[in-house]
Image (cartoon, rainbow, N blue to C red):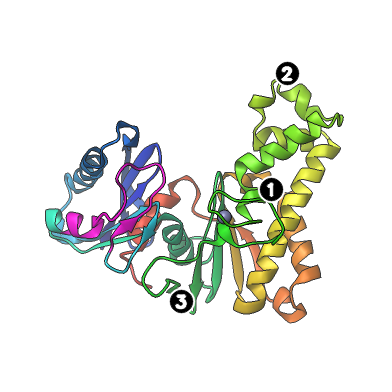
Amino acid sequence: MKCIGIDIGRTFIKAGVVENKGNIIKKEQIPTRGEEGKREVVLSQIENAIDFCFKGEDKKEIKGIGIGTPGLVDNNGIVYEAPNLPGWDNLPLREIIEKKYNIKTIVENDVNTIAWGEYLFGAGKGCKTMICITLGTGVGGGIVKDGKLLRGEKYSAVEIGHITIDYKGQKCKCGNYGCIERYVGRDYIVERAVNAIKEGKETKIYELVGGNLNKITPKTISQAYNLGDEVAKDIWTDVGICLGALFSSLINPLNPDIIVIGGGISQAGDILFETIRKTIKQRAMDVLAKSVEIVPAGLGVNAGIISGASLVFQK
Ligand SMILES: [Zn+2]
């Protein structure tokens, strides 16, 4: 049995045919073309990606199409408020694809999709209750509880990035204050380094970018950390404490057996993971802290395609 997995990203649509052990048989990526400002253009790109997947396949063997998209997705597969995609609001994506291809189609929020993929085929395989978080420009998350992807009453829920960790904190772009994303989102991590330099702190980050502060990335901060830089160490330690505090607040009510961390920022590696583990030990309730594992995501660069297909596969 095979399924088609589609991952709609800001720059590229990734698509592939995945068999039921989670292996990719073939894959392709094509430009999303969202910057052209027309939703029909993006829709036709999605159809081009699906057409590629069907080409040369026996249609009877394809069980369905699973699509991970930015934005909120309601129980009918209608997408709302997708950032960076023009007109991607009140869009009946499931109906459009199902009608065109006459095949079972499941549409889910992109991060919820990754959570389900990690649960079925990745780092969460075999667990019962899992929190999956992706750390990048934004902070997203999905939760699997007792073998089911957690959704809200009507919409894809679990906007973990907008949980407040400091009620007197900085204003977030969502309108709330002190959201975790405001502290560990990519640009805010970079901002910490820029501020340290502006305050006159000695750091190798400055040398690594040749004095051009616009060139600082989380990778630069990691490079400086590996060179023994104290400012870089402080940044990753504080990011780890923020995340550890967030996870403690989720561990106490949910008692997950595993927390899976993916996305570009998770590449910061040991300093980040060790600080998160230490903070959870200090802050979460003892027995709950002892029964949770903190692990990196397992699906790698093809996570979006495998996870998209995983929406159609049941456990
Ligand atoms: Zn927010």
Mark whose residue sits in front, 2 or 3? 2
Q: Quadrant of the C terminus?
A: bottom left
Other residues around mark 3 within 10 Å, as few (<14) / some (14–19) / many (≥20):
some
**Left or right of 242 in this view: 135:** left
First reached walking from the N terminus: tag 1 or tag 3: 3
Q: What amino acid does circle 2 point to? A: Gly
Magenta span dominant secondary structure = loop
Mark whose residue sits in front, 1 or 2? 2
Other residues around mark 2 within 10 Å, as few (<14) / some (14–19) / many (≥20):
few
Q: Which residues are magenta?
A: 77-98
| Circle 1 residue | 269
Q: Residue 200 magenta-drawn?
A: no
| Circle 2 residue | 210
Residue at the spot x=61%, y=47% of the render?
185
Residue at the spot x=60%, y=62% of the render?
163
**Could you tell me residue 134's position as x and y percent?**
55, 53
**Label 1 CB less than 8 angstroms from ligand 1:** no
Where 68 sits versus 210, above or below?
below
Q: State how far apart marks 2 and 3 are (Cα).
A: 50 Å
Q: Secondary structure at mark 2?
A: loop
| Circle 3 residue | 147
Q: Quadrant of ligand 1?
A: bottom right
**Could you tell me residue 220's position as x and y percent?**
69, 32
74 and 276: which one is in front?
Answer: 74
> Which residue appears farthest toward the top when viewing the image?
210
**Could you tell me residue 275's position as x and y percent?**
77, 56
Q: What amino acid does circle 3 point to? A: Gly
